[in-house]
């Protein structure tokens, strides 16, 4: 058995498509973002070229928060 919400969705989809969708599919390959790309989604106003440089603690904390989020979501922006 499926849950109430899942069954509702299945019934809706069954009624929405009255004909078979066999052979009508599109494959999309979606690759995860690099941290630089992920960071641009989150904070486009700052560049992250800070390797080898001393950065203020506030910037370090912000980068660290974004990096933890990057690791948590596997490179896909939330």
Image (cartoon, grey):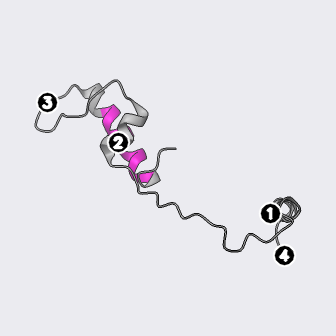
The rendered magenta stretch, by its main secondary structure, is classed as helix
Q: Which residue is mark 1?
A: 6
Q: Are marks 1 and 4 in contact (CB under 8 Å)?
A: no
Q: Are marks 4 and 2 in contact (CB under 8 Å)?
A: no
Q: N-terminal of the two: label 1 or label 4?
A: 4
Q: Which residue is mark 3?
A: 54
Q: Which mark is residue 1?
A: 4
Q: Nearer the viewer, mark 3 or mark 4?
A: 4
Mark 3: give few (<14), some (14-19) or many (20+) Cα within 10 Å: few
Residue drawn at point x = 25 percent, y = 34 percent:
48
x, y percent for residue 11? 87, 64
Q: Which residue is mark 2?
A: 37
Distance CA(mark 2)–CA(mark 3): 22 Å
- In depth, the one of 59 and 14 nearer the eye is 14
Q: N-terminal of the two: label 3 or label 4?
A: 4
Q: Are marks 3 and 1 in contact (CB under 8 Å)?
A: no
Distance CA(mark 3)–CA(mark 1): 51 Å
**Image height check: is 12 above or below 24?**
above
x, y percent for residue 9? 82, 60
Q: Are marks 2 and 1 in contact (CB under 8 Å)?
A: no
Assign a secondary structure to mark 2: helix
x, y percent for residue 16? 85, 58
- In depth, the one of 50 and 15 nearer the eye is 15
- Which residues are drawn in magenta? 61-72
Mark 4: give few (<14), some (14-19) or many (20+) Cα within 10 Å: few
Distance CA(mark 2)–CA(mark 1): 34 Å
x, y percent for residue 74? 42, 55
Distance CA(mark 1)–CA(mark 4): 10 Å
């Amino acid at each position: 058995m499926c849950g109430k919400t899942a069954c509702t969705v299945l019934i809706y989809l069954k009624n929405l498509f009255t004909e078979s969708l066999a052979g009508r599919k599109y494959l999309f390959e979606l690759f995860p973002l690099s941290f630089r790309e992920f960071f641009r989604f989150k904070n486009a106003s700052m560049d992250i070229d800070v390797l080898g440089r001393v950065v203020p603690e506030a910037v370090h904390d912000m980068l660290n928060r974004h990096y933890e989020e990057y690791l948590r979501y596997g490179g896909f922006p939330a």
